[in-house]
């Protein structure tokens, strides 16, 4: 059973370009979470999605950032007009929830975004 | 919203000794408390978790305790080994489908 997949693993962008990060959850998982980790810091929640729905985007900046989880294909976190402060590791996690019983979130390997 | 505090930020122990990391949380509705281990450049890996209906849980050398009244929970690692060296994060969540709120991490170094 493959784990959470993320690509690319490393992404370099110049200021003003767009960054597109992809996440495929574990098989059978329908919940996806995106977290950002700045160097030497903890993980900060950005957005929680289920298929075709954004459930909680309270941690995502209102401008330049967007996320989707379409019916088919991976979840995508999109950052427009990147700035140096966007440089970070972006982790995706997935979980399987049935009747509120299971909460474990399993993390992907992350995408390390560097903005030049 | 939830706020999770974690102490200490760094911890150095001799191989074979025990290590204890403590976290407090603010949201009384939180009922799920996982611990993650993150090695340099790697993904966070779930090592143990506890739910609010349990006071203690143990898995080999790792144990977690939860005090809901005081809103704090702790990670205990016994007989530490050099491969335990990593950054450990506690987290809290309200449960099914809710986001994780992480502590700031504890960098554990185990001296051979």
Image (cartoon, rainbow, N blue to C red):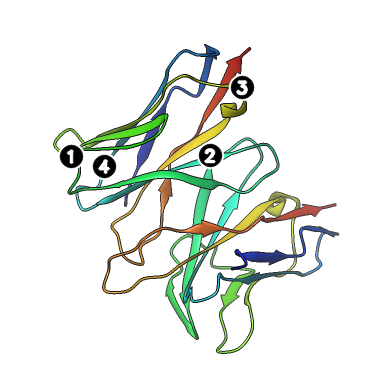
- Label 1, label 3: how far apart the Cα atoms are: 32 Å
Q: Residue under mark 3: which chain is it in?
A: B
Q: Residue under mark 1: which chain is it in?
A: B
Secondary structure under the numbered disc 1 in the rendered image:
loop
Secondary structure under the numbered disc 4 in the rendered image:
loop
Q: In the image, A110: left or right of A99?
A: right
Q: Residue at x 51, y 20 (%)?
A: B80
Residue B23 placement: quadrant? top left
Residue bearing the label numbered 1? B68
Q: In the image, B25: left or right of A52?
A: left
Residue bearing the label numbered 4? B26
Depth check, mark 1 against mark 2: the one in front is 2
Q: Residue at x 71, y 70 (%)?
A: A80
| Quadrant into which the C terminus of chain B falls | top right
Residue bearing the label numbered 2? B37
Q: Residue at x 61, y 59 (%)?
A: A108
Residue bearing the label numbered 3? B82
- Label 1, label 2: how far apart the Cα atoms are: 23 Å
Depth check, mark 1 against mark 3: the one in front is 3
- Please report whichever mark, 4 or 2, sits nearer to the chain's N-terminal start: 4
- Please report whichever mark, 1 or 2, sits nearer to the chain's N-terminal start: 2
- Label 3, label 4: how far apart the Cα atoms are: 33 Å
Depth check, mark 2 against mark 3: the one in front is 3
- Label 4, label 2: how far apart the Cα atoms are: 22 Å
Secondary structure under the numbered disc 2 in the rendered image:
strand
Q: Are marks 1 and 4 on the same chain?
A: yes
Depth check, mark 1 against mark 4: the one in front is 1
Q: Are marks 2 and 3 on the same chain?
A: yes
Q: In the image, B19: left or right of B111?
A: left
- Please report whichever mark, 3 or 4, sits nearer to the chain's N-terminal start: 4
């Amino acid at each position: 059973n493959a784990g959470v997949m993320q690509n690319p693993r490393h992404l370099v962008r110049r200021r003003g370009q767009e960054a597109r990060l992809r996440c495929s959850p574990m098989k059978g998982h329908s919940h996806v979470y995106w977290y950002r980790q700045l160097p030497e810091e903890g993980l900060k929640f950005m957005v929680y999605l289920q298929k075709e729905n954004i459930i909680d985007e309270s941690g995502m900046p209102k401008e330049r950032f967007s996320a989707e989880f379409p019916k088919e294909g991976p979840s995508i976190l999109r950052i427009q007009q990147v700035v140096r402060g966007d440089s970070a590791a972006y982790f995706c996690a997935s979980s399987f929830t049935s009747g509120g019983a299971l909460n474990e979130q399993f993390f992907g390997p992350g995408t390390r975004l560097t903005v030049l | 919203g939830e706020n999770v505090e974690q102490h200490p930020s760094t911890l150095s122990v001799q191989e074979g000794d025990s290590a204890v990391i403590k976290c407090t949380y603010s949201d009384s509705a939180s009922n799920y408390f996982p611990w993650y281990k993150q090695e340099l450049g790697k993904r966070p890996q779930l090592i143990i978790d506890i739910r609010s209906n349990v006071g203690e849980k143990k898995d080999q050398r790792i144990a977690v305790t939860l005090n809901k009244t005081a809103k704090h929970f702790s990670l205990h690692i016994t007989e530490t080994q050099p491969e335990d060296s990593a950054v450990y994060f506690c987290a809290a969540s309200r449960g099914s489908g809710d986001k994780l709120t992480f502590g700031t991490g504890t960098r554990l170094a185990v001296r051979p």
